[in-house]
Amino acid sequence: MYSIGQLSRMTGVKVPTIRYYEQMGLLDEPGRTAGNQRRYDSAGRERLSFIKHARELGLSIATIRDLIALARDESMPCAQAHEIAARQAVEIRQRIARLQKLEAELTRIGNSHDSGTVADCHVLATLGDHSMCLSDH
Amino acid sequence: MYSIGQLSRMTGVKVPTIRYYEQMGLLDEPGRTAGNQRRYDSAGRERLSFIKHARELGLSIATIRDLIALARDESMPCAQAHEIAARQAVEIRQRIARLQKLEAELTRIGNSHDSGTVADCHVLATLGDHSMCLSDH
DNA sequence: CTAATGTCTATAGCTGCTATAGCTTCAAGG
DNA sequence: CCTTGAAGCTATAGCAGCTATAGACATTAG
């Protein structure tokens, strides 16, 4: 049996975040001591690791809730879980593509090395006028 | 002179967002009609375009405020503006690198095509056990 | 002139936490 | 056994960057 602090240290999830996940319905309400403190078992710890990992992979709280509901019934087909993972991958690829455009733009802006004054600064000019950009974002 | 709705259509920034930017000190308070409605001129429109573009490039409200303050005095050297752009580029590169790791992970998870039940689903298993990952994230 | 649309302010909600206040409980040392 | 300090409890507020709502007033086209 672990206290919330021990669980926090084991998983690397901060204490208030654990309580938050419980509130959000991702963690089952654990047992309590006579003095009303939460006590977790290894099932709780595994569940929290699952949540942590899924969050690191960018899944939303709501999506994680879906996955947990899905996993509850072991006889369900897992196609849905695959679909969620695939959708998430697509989303991340889009975010990467978008960021790469921005990165190119910023690098280009930054490289125009006018050492003058603000009056004729490329950075500010480019920020002010999108048409100076090479790609759209 | 444009109403807030016209300005919104011209720039693609939603009406409540324009008011929010004003509140945040990014837009100067515009003139008003006798009936207390905001009326913008082209300077206001340009400023809003600047803000929009900067936001698209991932700059925070606070950073944009700095840039605007910087641009206010035309005789200031623009090294600071360059620095802000460069820092932003670095940050974006880091985000890209991180996302690419996640993308690899999700794609790998999704490709393990077990068409079975939740009980032995790779997606759920991998989410539950970080040690099954190839890279850390 | 009227009706529809637009705008006003103020306030609440969203996501995913994090921080604070003021209290109680736990565990270890003396 | 008792004290003390760390850790836990709940409830609430705050963060970014908007977005949505309510209820009132302004503008504009027909």
Image (spheres, coloured by chain):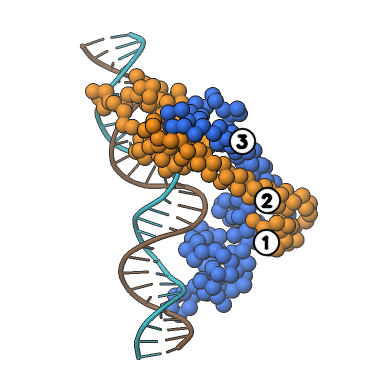
Chain colours: A orange, B blue, C cyan, D brown
Query: Which one is in front in this view, the residue at disc 2 or the one at disc 3?
Result: 3
Q: Is residue B84 visible?
A: no
Question: Residue A31 lies in what quarter of the image?
Answer: top left
Q: Are marks 2 and 3 on the same chain?
A: no
Residue type (three-letter) at the residue carrying disc 2: Lys
In the picture, residue B106 is in which quadrant? top right
Label 1's element? helix
Secondary element under disc 2, as helix, strand or loop, is helix
Chain letter of the residue carrying label 1: A
What's the residue at 51%, 58% (across, down)? B24
Q: Amino acid at mark 3?
A: Ala
**Mark in the foreground, 3 or 1:** 3
- Disc sitting over residue B104 in the figure: 3
Q: Quadrant of the N terminus of chain B?
A: bottom right
Q: Which residue is mark 2?
A: A101
> Which amino acid type is shown beneath numbered disc 1?
His
Direction from residue B109 to residue B124 in the image, left or right: left
Alpha carbon of mark 3 to alpha carbon of mark 1: how far? 33 Å
**Contact (Cβ within 8 Å) of mark 3 with mark 1:** no
- Answer whether residue A65 is visible to the viewer in this image: yes
- Residue at 54% x, 73% y: name it: B6
Residue holding disc 1: A130
Residue A123: x percent and y percent? 71, 55
Question: Marks 1 and 2: which is nearer the front?
Answer: 2
Sequence-first tag of 1 and 2 = 2
* Residue at left offset 27%, top offset 26%: A32
